[in-house]
Amino acid sequence: MLLVLTGTGLLAALALVAVPRTAPFGALMAVAALAGASVVGFQGLWITMLAELAPAGRVGATTGFAITFTVTAVTLTPPVLGLVADLAGTYRAIWVVLSGLLALAFIPAVLVHEPRDRLAS
């Protein structure tokens, strides 16, 4: 599901780059809603996955670090992307950057493999 959400977010971000300014408002809202749901929707799955894969006795530290990383990224991303839009002179630059980041997110996502003994439970 994590890969599905990442792929959906990537496609939605690319759609936001490609959608013309003259597109109907409803079409823009549909693409934006899809992007929002997929880009934000991964967090619960990600934290659950980390908790399941963490070594015994390290679940709190693992999830705590992950949440710290997530909150830091959520805090720093808006001003950085605002700067990107200001320097580029268009909001489309934000969607290009987001597309690149989501493409990079596939690298660690495909490297995670659930242990076989947990699949049986």
Image (cartoon, rainbow, N blue to C red):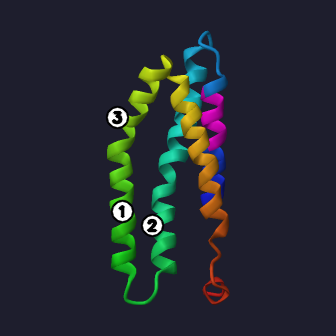
Main secondary structure along the magenta-highlighted residues? helix
- From the image, state whether disc 1 or disc 3 is nearer to you: 3
Q: Is residue 49 left or right of residue 76?
A: right
Q: Quadrant of the C terminus?
A: bottom right
Q: Earlier in the sequence, mark 3 or mark 2?
A: 2
Specify whether 18 is left or right of 78: right
Q: Which mark is residue 79?
A: 3
The magenta stretch spans residue 81: no
In the depicted structure, whether residue 115 falls above or below residue 72: below
Q: Could you tell me how many numbered marks the image carries?
A: 3
Residue drawn at x 37%, y 59% as measured from the top left: 69
Is residue 1 at all visible to an observer of this figure? no
Q: Residue at x 67, y 86 (%)?
A: 116
> Mark 1 sits on what residue?
67
Q: Amino acid at mark 3?
A: Pro
Q: Position of residue 57 (x, y in %)?
A: 37, 89
Dot 2 or dot 1: first in sequence order is 2
Q: Nearer the viewer, residue 68 or 16?
A: 68
The residue identified by callout 2 is 47
Q: Is mark 2 in CB contact (under 8 Å) with mark 1?
A: yes
- Quadrant assignment for the N terminus: bottom right
Q: CA distance from mark 3 to mark 2?
A: 25 Å
For label 2, the SS is: helix
Residue at disc 3, secondary structure: helix
Q: Nearer the viewer, residue 78 or 25?
A: 78
